[in-house]
Amino acid sequence: MPRLLVVPRWAGTPRSDYYPWLVDALADAPGRPFAPVIVADLPEPGHPRIHTWPPAIGRLLGDDPAVLADTFVMGHSVGCQALLHALAALPAGARVAGMLAVAGWWRVDDPWPAILPWQDRLPDLARVRATVPSLTVLLSDGDPFTGDYRENAAQWRERLGAEVEVVPGARHFNAAEEPAVLATLLRLAGGLRSSNV
């Protein structure tokens, strides 16, 4: 079974939001779809930097082609951008099993200075496409950071060929439990199993 690497949101840690609940829910799911489930504990979570987070994620991913091919990745908010940068930096020919981007964005409505590098310095999207065979994005119709979810969805489809799903009322997916995230991961894990049969 594949391992799952989760990259948290801005100021997120393995103990915040729905991450502890998700780890437990996946451990209790029939057939344990992912093992292990790793929630990245990144440097200075309250100050995610483009020169610190992607390299730290890269160290967690490693560079063993067989391990990477058996790794599914999930990002949340700025964690999606950090993950894209880390994936673009993997060795040529490396591929992961797939990616889920939760509350992913390309621009936020009211950017602050520390977020501008994440908006202005895009990863190598061709490298990301080559590394990620399938990308699913979960967006909300009421995200306080990206009001125009339709435009955001269009950008994910255009730039990376993503499949986008909109979850009504999910805001920025910061609740203690996020059933839509769990259900999507279980569905995607089922697709990974069937493709390996």
Image (cartoon, helix red, strand yellow):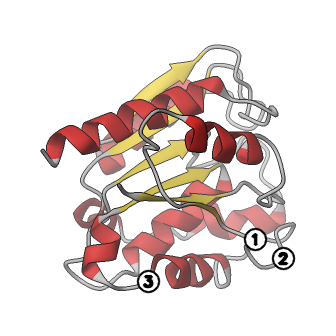
* Residue displayed at 58% across by 44% down: 27
Horizontal arrangement in the rendering, residue 70 relative to residue 110 (left or right): left
Residue 195, quarter of picture: top left
Q: Amino acid type of disc 3?
A: Gly
Q: Amino acid type of disc 1?
A: Pro
Q: Spatial distance from mark 3 to mark 2, Cα to Cα?
A: 21 Å
According to the picture, the residue beneath numbered tag 2 turns out to be: 44
* Residue displayed at 44% across by 83% down: 62
Foreground mark, 1 or 3, reads 3
Q: Nearer the viewer, residue 115 or 71?
A: 71
- Mark 1 touches mark 2? (CB < 8 Å): yes
Q: Nearer the viewer, residue 139 or 100?
A: 100
Residue 79, quarter of picture: bottom right
- Looking at the rendered image, the quarter that the C terminus falls into is top left
| Mark drawn on residue 93 | none
Looking at the image, is 7 positioned above or below residue 27? below
According to the picture, the residue beneath numbered tag 1 turns out to be: 48
* Residue displayed at 82% across by 34% down: 176
- Crowding at mark 1 (Cα within 10 Å: few <14, some 14-19, many 20+): many
Residue 91 screen position, x and y as percent: 30, 85
